[in-house]
Image (spheres, rainbow, N blue to C red):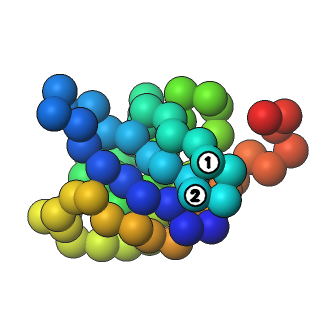
Amino acid sequence: MKIMIRRSHEGILSAYVPKKDLEEPIVDCERPEMWGGRITLANGWQLALPEMSADTTLPITVEARRLNEGVSE
């Protein structure tokens, strides 16, 4: 699924899922640089992000894969 990742003026990372009209803060990153690992959103969704350079600028739209599809929304 396509998601947009951005950083707010307060420095908080969030992910926006256009098909669900959902924006949630990113509460956990598997890797310090975020890319190529798993992130967890405040609503419990876990997404696998593609490998990208650690200095990738935000905001950016990427193709992510949802890992916990069986969890209710």
Badge 2: residue crowd in 10 Å (few <14, some 14–19, many ≥20): few
The residue drawn where x is 84% and y is 34% is 72
Say if residue 16 shows up in the picture. Answer: yes
Mark 2: amino acid: Pro
Residue drawn at (80%, 50%), measured in percent from left and top? 69
Residue at figure coordinates x 54%, y 27% from the top left: 42
Answer yes or no: is residue 36 visible: no
Quarter of the rendering containing residue 26? top left
* SS label for mark 2: helix
| Vertical relation: 66 (above or below) 7 | below
Q: Which residue is mark 2?
A: 18
Identify which residue, 67 or 3, lies in the foreground: 3
Q: Position of residue 10 (x, y in %)?
A: 17, 27
Residue at the spot of label 1 = 21
Quadrant, the N terminus: bottom right
Q: Which mark is residue 29?
A: none
Q: Tell me which residue sits at (50%, 60%) in the image.
A: 3
Q: Verify CB contact (< 8 Å) between mark 1 and mark 2.
A: yes
**Where in the figure is residue 8, as x and y percent of width and height?**
23, 37
Which is nearer the eye, 49 or 15? 15
Question: Whole-percent x and y of residue 52?
Answer: 30, 72
Residue type, label 1: Asp
Q: CA distance from mark 1 to mark 2?
A: 5 Å
User: Helix or strand or loop: what does disc 1 sit on?
Assistant: loop
Residue nearest the observer in this picture, 44 or 51: 44
On the picture, is 27 further left or further right than 6?
right
